[in-house]
Image (cartoon, helix red, strand yellow):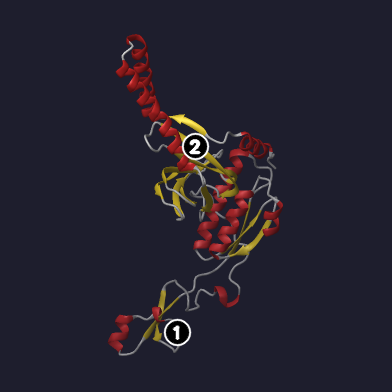
């Protein structure tokens, strides 16, 4: 299991973080250089017009700081999250941001102190309205990502400075293995078709066409062959072969670490996706848990969750849910 010292360090950094951070933008650097030049000119020449211009430039810096602070104050943010996050590829992530009174402009939201890259923005946020901000984030590796806070940045009104505030918000994002292709065969199935469930001659599947017969009452109308039905003057139903359903139990060898473990997780995820798409039953066996065979999208999600947690310390509430 991987240690939790990184999580503790992230929480300590969150506690010691200043309430606001300020960064000078590219335009702001040019503005400050011009202001400094005007100040030097005013000192050397003693021209009152230069002093007046210097005061105007400095006052704009103060106005920018006051207005940007009003933008990021009194904000409420909650995570909407994502449907699924796969390592190494963009995934849609959402936050819901609102404020009780006043308006906010040019807000940029991102996850603070996180390996996730990417940000989303909103140009105008009125009071009393919850706005959904969408961003395409990228996670470098699979596994659980601890989220400590949401970073809100604004460059309003002049774009001279980027003022940032971090709203503390604990969370967890589970990143699935990278999607790719499996370069290996899944091996032999544990068992073949059982009873009528896997009879390849059963005429209610999705395989090759075996014939036509009259549609019975209560049957699915999507099976009707409309061209033949029009020529025969009655509703005819298409009969297709049912393909075999087999069961595979995929496994990850104990003792794998580093890139070897990452690559094996990616291969198992790709094999599970392919077999489940074909209608087979797939299970998973690792050194930490064993998932019984199943079918469908829910089973694929369970396999992906197990692969994402493999090699990481799972919290107790997650173990109870599993």
Quarter that holds the N terminus: top right
| 37 vs 158: above or below | above
Note whether residue 304 is visible.
yes
Which corner quadrant of the image does residue 193 belong to?
A: bottom right
Residue 6 lies in quadrant = top right
Vertical placement of residue 168 versus 241, above or below: above
> Which quadrant would the C terminus be assigned to in this image?
bottom right
Task: Name the residue beneath numbered marker 2.
Answer: 164
Residue at (69, 55) in percent of width and height: 317
Whichever of labels 2 and 1 marks the residue nearer the N terminus, that label is 2
Image disc number at residue 97: none
Point 56% across, 58% down: residue: 301
Residue 89 x, y percent position in the rendering: 47, 46
Q: Farthest residue in the front direction?
A: 48
Callout 1: SS: loop
Q: Is residue 234 left or right of residue 172?
A: left
Choose between 127 and 143: the one closer to the eye.
127
Q: Closer to the camera, 161 or 241?
A: 161
**Tag 2 secondary structure:** strand
Farthest left residue in view: 231
Q: CA distance from mark 2 to mark 1?
A: 61 Å
Kindly identify which residue carries mark 1: 219
Name the one closer to the observer, 29 or 282: 29
Rendering quarter of residue 119: top left
Mark 2 or 1, closer to the camera: 2
Residue 118 in view in this figure: no
Categorize mark 1 by other alpha carbons within 10 Å: few (<14), some (14-19), many (20+): few
């Amino acid at each position: 299991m991987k240690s939790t010292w990184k999580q503790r360090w992230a929480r300590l950094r969150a506690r010691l973080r200043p309430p606001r951070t300020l960064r000078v933008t590219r335009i702001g650097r040019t503005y400050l250089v011009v202001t400094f030049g005007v100040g030097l000119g005013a000192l050397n020449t003693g021209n009152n017009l230069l002093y007046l211009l210097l005061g105007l430039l400095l006052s704009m810096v103060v106005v920018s700081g006051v207005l940007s602070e009003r933008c990021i104050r009194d904000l409420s943010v909650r995570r909407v999250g994502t449907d699924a996050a796969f390592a190494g590829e963009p995934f849609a992530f959402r936050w819901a941001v609102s404020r009780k009174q006043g308006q906010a402009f040019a807000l940029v939201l991102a996850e603070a102190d996180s390996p996730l890259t990417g940000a989303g923005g909103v140009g105008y946020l009125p009071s009393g309205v919850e706005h959904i901000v969408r961003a395409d984030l990228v996670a470098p590796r699979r596994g659980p990502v601890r989220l400590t806070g949401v970073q809100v940045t604004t460059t309003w009104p002049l774009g001279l400075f980027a003022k940032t505030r971090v709203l503390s918000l604990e969370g967890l994002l589970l990143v699935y293995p990278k999607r790719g292709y499996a370069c290996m065969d899944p091996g032999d199935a544990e068992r073949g078709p059982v009873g009528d469930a896997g009879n390849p001659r059963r005429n209610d599947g999705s395989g090759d066409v075996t014939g036509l017969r009259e549609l019975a009452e209560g049957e699915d109308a999507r099976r009707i062959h409309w061209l033949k039905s029009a020529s025969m003057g009655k509703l005819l139903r298409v009969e297709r072969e049912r393909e075999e359903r087999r069961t595979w139990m995929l496994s990850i060898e104990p003792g794998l670490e580093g890139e070897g473990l990452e690559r094996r997780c990616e291969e198992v995820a790709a094999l599970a996706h392919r077999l489940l798409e074909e209608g087979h039953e797939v299970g998973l066996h690792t050194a930490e848990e064993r998932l019984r065979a199943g079918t469908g999208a829910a089973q694929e999600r369970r396999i992906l969750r197990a692969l994402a947690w493999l090699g990481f310390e799972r919290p107790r509430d997650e173990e109870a849910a599993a």
